[in-house]
Amino acid sequence: MNQSATLSLAAMLAVGSSVGATISASAQSATAPDSTTASGARPFTYPSARKSDQVDSYHGVQVADPYRWLEDPDSPETRAWISAQNMLTTTFLNAIPQREALRARLGALWNYEKYDTPVKRGDRYFYALNTGLQNQAVLYVQEGRSGTARALLDPNTLASDGTVALNSRVPSSKGKYLAYGVATAGSDWVEVRVRDVASGADLADTVRWIKFSVPSWSKDEKGFVYARYDQPSQDKALSQIVKNQKIYYHAVGTPQSSDRLVYERSDRPDWIWGTEISDDGRFLIISASEGSDPKTRIFYMDLKDPQKPDFSGKMVEVLGAGDAEYDVVGNIGDLLYIRTDKGAPRGRIIAVDVKDPFESKWVTVVPESDDVLTGARFIGGRLFTTVLKNAHSAIYSYAVPALSSKAAGKTSAALGERVEVKLPGLGSLSGLSGNLHDSEVFYGFMSYLAPTTIYEYDIKSGTSKVFRSPKLGFDPSLYETRQVFYASKDGTRIPMFITMKKGTVLDGKNPMLLYGYGGFNISLTPAFNPRTLVWLEKGGIYAVANLRGGGEYGSSWHRAGTLHQKQNVFDDFISAAEYLISEKYTSSSKLAINGGSNGGLLVGAVVNQRPDLFGAAVPEVGVMDMLRFQKFTIGWAWTSDYGSSDDSKQFATLYKYSPIHNLKAGTKYPPVMVMTADHDDRVVPGHSFKYAAALQAAQGGAAPVLIRIESKAGHGAGKPTSKQIEEAADRFGFLMQALGM
């Protein structure tokens, strides 16, 4: 299908990387205790947070919510609280002696060229490049393989502080136009604009109120389909629940008010649409998911003539049960090739005839294996598949007889021999690019110790060569990544990656940072980030646990960490910490934990359950109020993983682990720095505000509980480089102070 530089729908809805941002520049000095000792020598005096008498009844259970007022980020009382908290945090961080050196070293390590995988449209190649410390990557276009690249779109010119980012960038089928989505201050709301590639000038087209959707161009390059919501109330754009997404067709050169409504389902307000136009231009393929549940339904519209597509045709249901995950890989004539976990928890590929789509007629062309099938696409007359082997990547390709010249016009679904694409080592793909009839295949590959390198794969010879490789001011040969397996509380075997300096003595004295996520079918695979290198250089060990709830071992692994089984995720993370301590990688006083979004929930929950186990914790943009998350923006979409307090049985489960509701007054909690942003409209900042206020009130020890609130930032996507560096310096400065490094 068309490449559109987009995350999976679940990832767009709920993904959380290590996110956060810098303290507001307007924060002034504040009176605070001496913070020069490892974790704060004396109890802190925190900004006053009023406790209201708000009590809610959930299925007969009375639940107090004294900090409900903090859910309104713009009220004068909340703004005063934010200002006071920022002043306290700024004072603490300014007193950390390592902070400036950390910032300088982070800047030096961040200063390398960052390329993404090139996309070819017609004779033009499109790719993004950040030369080093640019706040946002610049999109370039090159005419042919030997042409001179020129900057096509520089988002750094859209805002002086880098807070306007590209959410998507989709060239049309022959590269005449570029549709690009702009997000401001980290918001999920996107405005799509159209640029003429030859002239580099924007057209008048502006398409607004888009979330969780990427444009898909028609074959004739005259327009694109997209999904949008109705315009929200002006004062509630960052918090109002969004539902009833609709699919439109936008014709280039016309106002949005003239866009054609292609499809809607008012009877299904929770459905979220994925839209793709097939490579041959014949079909509009749409997928429907209920929130972030990976189960999907597949529909298609026959556009008839690709050069004169008709978007007024009948929408036909192909797979409408919503009983499994279905992802259309591409088509050959009337045959849709679909990746699914129906009857195959780790995935298989089936061929389905759109005119006879009954399950009894499905043909399995790539059977389920021990590996998890994560994606597939037709490139160069072959079918390329990507898989996970114990949470790291592999690529295979299959001959497609129906695409050969001898078989032209035949409709056989069969595939031929399988060939493995040899990858450089233990790592992850960061892109796979190519067109159906071209011979070029590009892919990106990275690891914990090596930044993304772009490779070009030759289909005929079966060999790869480096296409673009960055130079980094760091010697990775001094370090190593190993994969270990440990037993969780119930005996389940859990993988974990550990990266550290070679020769590190395992004596229990090493500072350790343990990261986790565990949700929404999202897999944590080896990923490069320059901030990890700084931690390693300071003598730290970095570990990533592949918890249940993720997608590392397929749909059954995901389900084992959802709903009433969510405690498995926390047990897996606690068991990871206990393993690292028992194997003497570290000790409790030297062990810090970190996670963002769903991972922020993870950190909050395990700190409550085992406050004695950790030396420090940094939960970022976390889902901390498990009884009210569904009442804001896209939070309702997470009930497939979490459940909802509206259900009595699910309420009982949520109430048992909700971070805000399981704090115990007088408990000695470890040093905690909560991180959030005032423009986060994915996980609204009220979660972190209420959690920080409640934790500060409950803290019975001397360790600091701080909250770091960034302005003009959101959940993490598109965050400027400058803010990422500031954030990392503060995170590691706090952790070094807390762990006595």
Image (cartoon, grey):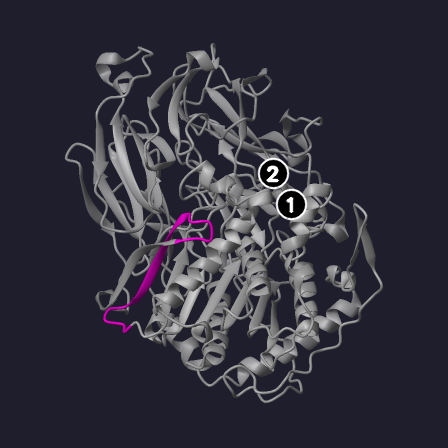
**Foreground pick, 623 / 549:** 549
Q: Can residue 579 be seen in this view?
A: yes
Q: Is residue 378 left or right of residue 562?
A: left
Query: Which quadrant of the structure image shows residue 124?
Result: top left
Q: Is residue 266 left or right of residue 56?
A: left
**Residue occupying image coordinates x 68% and y 34%:** 244
Q: Residue 275 location in percent, x, y?
A: 53, 31
Give the residue pinned by disc 1.
634
Q: Residue 460 location in percent, x, y?
A: 16, 32
**Foreground pick, 459 / 296:** 296
Highlighted magenta segment, given as a residue range: 487-505
Kind of residue indicated by mark 1? Ile
Report if the CB atoms under discs 1 and 2 are less than 8 Å apart.
yes
Query: Which quadrant of the structure image shows residue 77?
Result: bottom right
User: Label 1 crowding class (10 Å Cα cut-off): few <14, some 14-19, many 20+?
Assistant: many
Secondary structure category for the residue under label 2: loop
